[in-house]
Image (cartoon, rainbow, N blue to C red):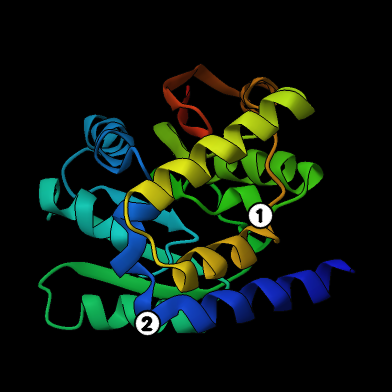
Amino acid sequence: MGTTERHLGIGAAFDRAAASYDAGRRRLIPCFDEFYATAIALVTEAAPPGARILDLGAGTGLLTALVADARPDADFTLTDLSEGMLDQARARFADSPLTVRFRAMDHLALAEVGAYDVVMSALSIHHLEDEGKRRLYAACARALKPGGRFVNADQVAGDDAAMEARYWQHWRDRVVAAGTSPEDLAAAIERQSFDRRTPLAPQLDWLREAGLGAVECRYKNVSFVVICGDRG
């Protein structure tokens, strides 16, 4: 499958899931509270008053909504490949006093330079092939203002096939135990067919190669991680 076909497939899969996507988040992310709380803390501690924040692959706007609870003064730009997801985000913020903009965009179209105080993403970048991840991390570093921060709350692969099998089984056991319906589980597995998860260590290296400093994995729970780096 070519890149364009894959992107169309990803967009279609998430368009189908858009209306019901948020309802299953806590069941499908076993460590939901700690995972998002870590990302929010990293974003808010780096964001000055009136910060410009880019949410890449924003989906329904969940991460932006959580960050905005702490930083309602920020100026948010939300991007996503799926128009259906962005429609849900538009509905979420329709009556909000927040400053929120929306842009249907492939991640690799990011071309701004020195535009944002924070670039953040949740559960989206893992759809890119490794070379796409490297290119995107470099683009995110360029898009940051001096002193800005990149935060990625995402899933990583195990270091080898055996570890990856354990990661997968752990996730499946937890989400089934949480009461995920067979239909929702099947839909989640379909979306995961588009995943291109990568182990943690090379991704930290790619952030350093992109020119970011203070690179770290602040949180890890099996496959769920929150990684970050700062532009000097």
Give the crowd class for mark 1: few <14, some 14-19, many >=20 residues within 10 Å. many
Q: Which residue is mark 2?
A: 19
In percent of the image, x 12 and y 82: which residue is there? 95
Is residue 10 visible to the viewer in this orientation of the structure? yes
Describe residue 217's horizontal placement relative to residue 52 as left or right: right
Residue 153 position in % (x across, y down): 44, 40
Q: Foreground residue, 165 or 92?
A: 165
Query: Amino acid type of disc 2?
Result: Ala
In percent of the image, x 75 and y 48: which residue is there? 132
Residue 73 position in % (x across, y down): 13, 54
In percent of the image, x 60 and y 61: which residue is there? 189
Describe residue 162's horizontal placement relative to residue 228 as left or right: right
Q: Look at the numbered disc 1 and give the secondary structure of its residue.
A: helix
Determine the CA span between mark 1 and mark 2: 20 Å
Q: Foreground residue, 162 or 47?
A: 162
Q: Which residue is mark 1?
A: 127
